[in-house]
Image (cartoon, helix red, strand yellow):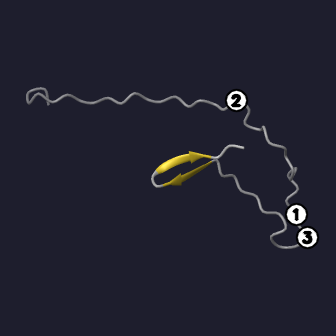
Amino acid sequence: MSQNGYLAVIKIKKRYKKPGDPHSKKNVLVRNFSASCPFDKMVTDVTEYKIDGKKILYQQ
């Protein structure tokens, strides 16, 4: 590569930053996953959406 004048591109590693308080929301379910009927308790964790190729973070 050096004979042809090419240089290797080295990418700098990005460090992960921890959020300030990861458990800032109230724990309503309290790990009680049993339900009396189907679809009584539905839980999901969506922290970001991808719209038109751009990331949009969900914050309340």
**Depth-wise, is mark 2 or mark 3 nearer the camera?**
2
How dense is the environment of label 1, judged by Cα within 10 Å: few (below 14), some, or many (20 and up)? few
Left or right relative to 33: residue 2: left
Q: Quadrant of the C terminus?
A: top right
Q: For residue 18, what is the image quadrant? A: top right
Report which residue position mark 1 lands on.
34
Report which residue position mark 3 lands on.
36
* Disc 1 to disc 3, C-alpha distance: 7 Å
Percent x, y for residue 49?
Answer: 57, 52
User: Closest to the observer: 12 or 20?
Assistant: 20
How dense is the environment of label 3, judged by Cα within 10 Å: few (below 14), some, or many (20 and up)? few
Instruction: Give the residue displayed 85% in from the left and 46% down from the top.
Output: 27
For the residue marked with disc 1, what is the amino acid?
Answer: Ser
Q: For residue 3, what is the image quadrant? A: top left
Instruction: Give the residue displayed 48% in from the left and 48% down from the top.
Output: 54
Local secondary structure at mark 3: loop
Percent x, y for residue 33?
Answer: 85, 59
Report which residue position mark 2 lands on.
20
Left or right relative to 11: residue 24: right
**Depth-wise, is mark 1 or mark 2 nearer the camera?**
2
- Residue that extends furthest to the bottom in the rendered view of this protein: 37
Q: Quadrant of the N terminus?
A: top left
Image: 16 above or below 34? above
Q: Earlier in the sequence, mark 2 or mark 3?
A: 2
For the residue marked with disc 3, what is the amino acid?
Answer: Ser
Q: Earlier in the sequence, mark 1 or mark 2?
A: 2
Asked whether disc 1 touches disc 3, contact meaning CB atoms under 8 Å apart, the reply is no
Q: How many marks?
A: 3
User: Closest to the observer: 48 or 42?
Assistant: 48
Asked whether disc 2 touches disc 3, contact meaning CB atoms under 8 Å apart, the reply is no
